[in-house]
Image: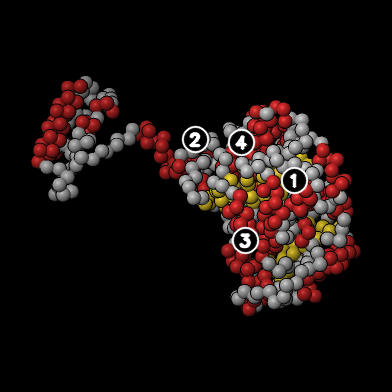
Amino acid sequence: MIPPDQSDKLPYGFVPVKRAKKDVFIKSSVDDKQVKYIHDVFTEEKERGARNFTDSRSMTWSWKEDTFQKFRDKIGGSSIKIIDPDEQRTKYDEFERPSNRPRKAQSKSNKEMNPREIRLWRNDNQVNFRAKFKVSTPPMIEWGSPLQPELVSELREQNFAKPLVIQAASIPLSIDSYDIIGLSQPGTGKTLAYVIPLLYYILEYKKNHPETNNFSIPLSVVLVPTHELAVQVQEVIDKLGINLGIKSRTLTGSFRLNDQALELSHENHVIVATPGRLKDAIEAHLVSVKKVFFIVMDEADKMVDKSLGPQISFILNECPKEKHLMMFSATMPHEVLSIVEEFFTKVVTVSVGEIGGASENIKQVVHYCRQADRLGLLLKSLRGMKAPIIVFTNTRDSCEKSAMEIQNNGFRSAFIHGGKSQKERDSIVEGIQNNLFDVLVATDVISRGIDIPNVENVVNLELPRNIHTYVHRIGRTGRNGKEGIATSFVTKDDKEIMYDLAAMLRRGNFAIPDEMARDPSSQHRVEPTENEHFDQ
């Protein structure tokens, strides 16, 4: 503090600080000698400043002449850091940003984010990490290092403008050699979240082992629950990998193993397989996984639902002990946790948004009605919807009858259920992708693993029994950042799902019909009374 009795002698540009009525010191922080020392220093520096003063109208100030620097360690023995105003503006200008300006973390490259900016990014994007150790890896907010230039070029060539949230969070962790468990909603880009690290590691391996460029032993395995998802994953791998010299094959139970043996003998770096069929191929010595170092389990909860846990464990035990693992799952049942505990090391769990919830990009609309009125309401609703449209039913019989009724009302419709051969399913999916049909009616055989571009509307003509299947059904729209609408027809018979559906609608601030809100099943959860499986 500058003594006010000498303030009239201060050079131009110095502002005296008014003394408080009473000085307050922390007990034992300073003594009389320190106070006298501070006063003497101020006097000395004030006189030096006056000697250097030449022109009161153009006086310049140098931080080298900061009088506080000489006694900064003398006040109570503490160290007080002086911040350059220019540096302060550079470091903290985000506090002055307008509310509609993106956070500073968003504009920085992948390696420039400090811990605070990483926390901001995670909070803004509802990203949570769980690990037994500190995780400080910054997100990949743009395509770049450490990805190889040729991989980055291919991503841009395929119009992947920038990483989606689950990709930005999990890709750099995988490249940092963590085992990843990814929990995210359907349609958020999780396939690319593991395909990019997969391609990265194979490119690195090929660079360091050029002798492996032309051999049939796979380096990576992707395990999926269904043939449809296997085909979709292979398409993504081939889309990015074909120009990088990386080849993939599918191996599922939809075709005879002997018919697939010839393809397996050709050059391949990645096998996308269902666990049961890959186990059969290993035991038949048609496939060797002894050099596999990167393994992905997609929709792990669905695989254990289908009692595929033992097959997964068999495959993981056949692979080398040193391997890199990624798992994506909507939920974490006990069987999935058992696989994690047995095989994963240095695990980071990455979750985005509400686990088990629907994407925020999907608007959910619910109509409470009588069961006999559903089909008529559906036909009326379809006239205001943009094709292609997916309509879900619970059984093969209702699937076929609904598709016929839709066809009779002027829509080009097709249907898929478990009674269709794989060749027929693939043909129908290709048809709707090529705009040959307006409406696809299906059972839950396509609720996972089918990505039909530009689907804006999904309709639940009949609701499933559980909320997880509901989430996967409506996840066929609102994918990869696009908007979508999910319309559902609820009746008094939908007791098992009504409570969870009402809770999901409330969390998303979507309207709940008055009749549904008054239904006791929406107020208290009703457990299934029997273990009934629909004929899908």
User: Type of residue at label 3?
Assistant: Pro
Res. 143 mark:
4
N-terminal-most mark, 4 or 1? 4
| Residue occupied by mark 1 | 272
In the picture, which quadrant includes the C terminus?
bottom right
Displayed quadrant of residue 216? top right
- Label 4 element class: loop
Along the line of sight, the residue nearer the viewer: 316 or 5: 316
Whether residue 331 appears in this view of the structure is no
Distance between the alpha carbons at the discs numbered 4 and 1: 25 Å
N-terminal-most mark, 3 or 2? 2
N-terminal-most mark, 3 or 1? 1
N-terminal-most mark, 2 or 1? 2
- Give above or below for 514 relative to 229: below
- Residue 349 picture location, percent across and down: 56, 51
| Residue occupied by mark 2 | 112
Foreground: disc 4 or disc 1: 1
Along the line of sight, the residue nearer the viewer: 404 or 268: 268
